[in-house]
Amino acid sequence: MILIVDDQPENIYSLRKLLESRDFKVDTAESGEAALKKILQNEYRLIILDVQMPGIDGFEVAETLSGYSKTKDIPIIFLSAANTDKEFITQGYASGGVDYVTKPVDPDILMLKVKTFSKLYEQQRSLNRTQDALRLEIETRKKAQTELKEQVDQLHKTLESLPQIAFTATSEGEIDFVNKQWFQYSSSMKQFPPTYEGERICEKWAVYRKNGSPFELEVRIKALQSEVFRYHLLRIIPIKEKDSVVSWVGTFTDIDDQKQIEKRKDEFLSIASHELKTPLTSVKAYIQLLDRSIEKKPGESASIYISRVQDQLKKLDSLIADLLDISTIENGKLKLNRKVFDFEQFLDHVIQTVHHTHDRASPVIERVGDAIDVLVTADEIRIEQVLINYLTNAIKYSPGSDRVIVTTEKGDNHVKVSVRDFGIGVPEDKKHSVFDKFYRVEESSVKFQGLGIGLYICSEIIRQHGGTYGVESHAGEGSTFYFTIPLD
Ligand code: ADP
């Protein structure tokens, strides 16, 4: 909007007509005081200001406007009838005008000036806006940078205070900070400590770096001053912002003592289970001899006791077999004996076996799903061990329930077997641990006997077959344990 200020209404009228005929929006004021009021309240892109007015004259209006940041840049064209002297014109410019026009006014020239000045004003305003936005952006960035630096400093202080070796790396994997512990193991900040295994940590990590996923590796490293390599757990975690990795934080934690204890425990298990096996085999043989040598009469106590001893011996045998399996797995010696077999027959046989070895009050095992009418290549005895384990667990952890369902699914290149029970279920936060070695859900461990190794052995057997395993469950609503094995 353009403001015309003149004490003569006829002057205002003719100028207003002229400007409105060129599509300009116009406002008017008939005195300096009225003009100042309006200018402070409204937005004008140009002021056409009469110089000679009673009260505050045009020059005084202009000088006042130049004192306010809001108004100082509005262009002013002075209009004057009388004062064409150089002195007046100079005063006009000095008080903040951009032009000085004397009456009578040439309408075309005035219009050209109005157009040019209002356009210039608009451009300047837009430039000012851009400048303000830029200034704000710079300030925001500076603030963000300062905050980031503070965070990084804080992180470095935290990493310095850790007893572990700690470091950070850029998103490309270049190490950019190490704590003082690092230099006890590596002479260069840019190089990982050399490992006993000769493994190149950088290369192993590269795959995980590409995916942006956390990386874990057990390695043996040694302090520069020492001759002894110790087991360390290397963990490198991505720091993400909006799904993209901005840096990595890593630590090496000394787990050697833990490893040695585990090793001694595994050695003990291996020796103990082997040692137990020999006398157990003899006891089994003598019981068989005893069984054959006594004269059996149905219902007689001696034969009932012998049969109970045999049941208990079977349990003992299976416990020792599990313990032996653990040490075989730990030594990396679990070998598969793969053969082609008929999966349908296999399933029937396993379900029958479990059925016969449980009493009549046990849940009924139902079979649903796809018929597996293909030959499968796998270690039949080991897969049977897995399925028997799932089924006996399903029965064991479902007191009072009346059925267990075995479901089979034939995929394009795998077979999936699921065992569903309606028992106590596994709490959400324990589901990821049930396949761990010696893990038992605490809430149920007193009520149900066990060693917590069955599912661990199952997971290793399935892993060696290249299959997958898992559990879906809700506490109190039962569980579905499943495994898959590849078809080729
Ligand atoms: P064990 O049964 O000898 O304790 P497992 O390795 O077979 O050892 O199972 C580990 C743990 O997983 C069990 O102690 C139990 O807490 C839980 N678990 C396994 N199967 C089931 C099931 N069908 N329902 C509920 N919990 C189960």
Image (tube, helix red, strand yellow):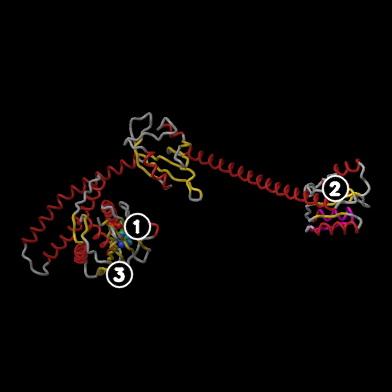
Label 1 CA crowd tier, 10 Å (few <14, some 14–19, many 20+): some
Residue 229 position in % (x across, y down):
33, 34
Label 3 CA crowd tier, 10 Å (few <14, some 14–19, many 20+): some
Amino acid type at mark 1: Val
Q: Which numbered disc covers residue 62? A: 2
Q: Secondary structure at mark 3?
A: loop
Above or below for 416 versus 75: below
Q: Which residue is labeled 1 in the image?
A: 441
Q: Which residue is labeled 3 in the image?
A: 401
Label 2 CA crowd tier, 10 Å (few <14, some 14–19, many 20+): many
Residue 340 position in % (x across, y down):
18, 57
Q: Residue at x 54, y 42 (%)?
A: 151
Residue stretch in magenta = 24-39
**Between 12 and 157, the one nearer to me in the picture:** 12
Q: Could you tell me how far apart the alpha carbons at marks 1 and 3 are, in whole angstroms?
A: 20 Å
**Dot 2 or dot 3, earlier in sequence:** 2
Q: Secondary structure at mark 1?
A: loop
Q: Specify whether tag 1 is near ligand 1 (CB below 8 Å).
A: yes
Q: Does residue 444 appear left or right of residue 376 in this picture?
A: right
